[in-house]
Image (spheres, grey):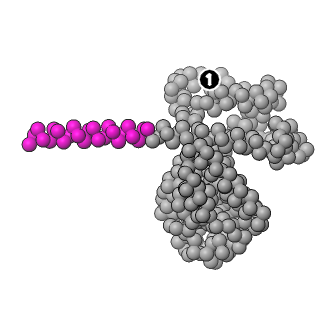
Amino acid sequence: MKIITVLGAGIMGHGVAQLLAQAGYIVRIQARRETSLETAKKMITNSLKIMVDKGMLSQEKMEQTLDNIKYTTDLLEAIQDTDFILESIPEVLETKLDTYEIIESIVSEKTIIASNTSTFPLKELTQRAKHPGRFIITHYFNPPQLVPIVEIAKFEKTDENVVKVTYDLMKEIGKTPVVLKKEITGFIVNRIQVAFLRECFNLIELGVCTAEDIDIAVRGSMGFKWAFCGPMESQDLAGLQTTQAMVYNIEQDLSNTREVPKFLKEMVEKSEHGIRSNKGFYEYDDNGAKAIYTRDDNFLDLLKLIQDKEAKKEKTASAVKNKQCDSLKIVRKKLV
């Protein structure tokens, strides 16, 4: 695999293109408008500069990464002779289906088509496909160049070799892939996130606390713990008898609504969309530029810490293995 195409230059598209280019692939990123490509190039450059400043990337590697990315508004040029396509265009089914039809009329039968969708199941995405077995979902999280996880979703027609190639590619570019055993709406993370948000929204509606109170509470508790110890392991460490009692005492009082909260609907109707409108649960004066920079800066610190810990773990494991090998050699010599 040498050439990879990313369709869509938005928040997800440009971040994935950066990841692939950092791993040494030639990446073609395609968008309909030149302005979108210019913005993507600027964001990729800024992201790489931060990594250089933190000592996580050399200046030479940054320049090589930028050289690996080719920008185009021409879809046919973007997909010509490509080995892997990552589709990250707007969540409009007809647009995706039309795009896939064009792709399949041009590319080799061996070219894998991966969608970053979090909305549509593969059964819907492949309804017009000539070769549905090559379709797969790779669901990244914002910002994709920093958040480690990628959810891989397949369906009954997905070729198992496509799953393997995709999994290996995600590992190669530094991601932590999780393959779902069956297809389900929202996959793993978004289902958990929506359930979590439902209770957050309920606490706000009940007047128990503010949005800021929730952020402070979560950052200092679950947010602190879950970076290195997920929710299931956390319960093991706390004791499942405690978990059972907690669930029994609280779950009957939790929200089970299936409606979007009234206050959230009103915020959206008033164009309070978050950073895009400079107002959401918080207020911004720069389209969230400072907030995004701070977030990414903190994420990079956390990512560097995780990488350092993993490297130390591997070094320790290697040292133990070498010591065991040396001991085995000594035993063999004595036996001889």
Residue 328 locus on image (x, y percent): 20, 40
Q: Nearer the viewer, residue 185 or 36?
A: 36
- 258 displayed left or right of 105: right
Question: Which residue type does callout 1 highlight?
Answer: Met
Residue drawn at x 81%, y 37% is 281
Residue density around tag 1, few if under 14, some if 14–19, many if 20 or more, within 10 Å: few
Q: Tell me where the magenta segment starts and ends, as one range.
A: 312-336
Give the overall secondary structure of the magenta segment.
helix
Residue drawn at x 59%, y 21% is 245
Q: Is residue 231 magenta?
A: no
Residue 139 locus on image (x, y percent): 62, 53
- Quadrant into which the C terminus falls: top left
The secondary structure type at the circle numbered 1 is helix
- 57 displayed left or right of 47: left
Residue 220 locus on image (x, y percent): 65, 27
Q: Nearer the viewer, residue 269 or 249?
A: 269
Q: Which residue is mark 1?
A: 246
Residue drawn at x 82%, y 30% is 205
- Specify whether residue 192 is in view: no
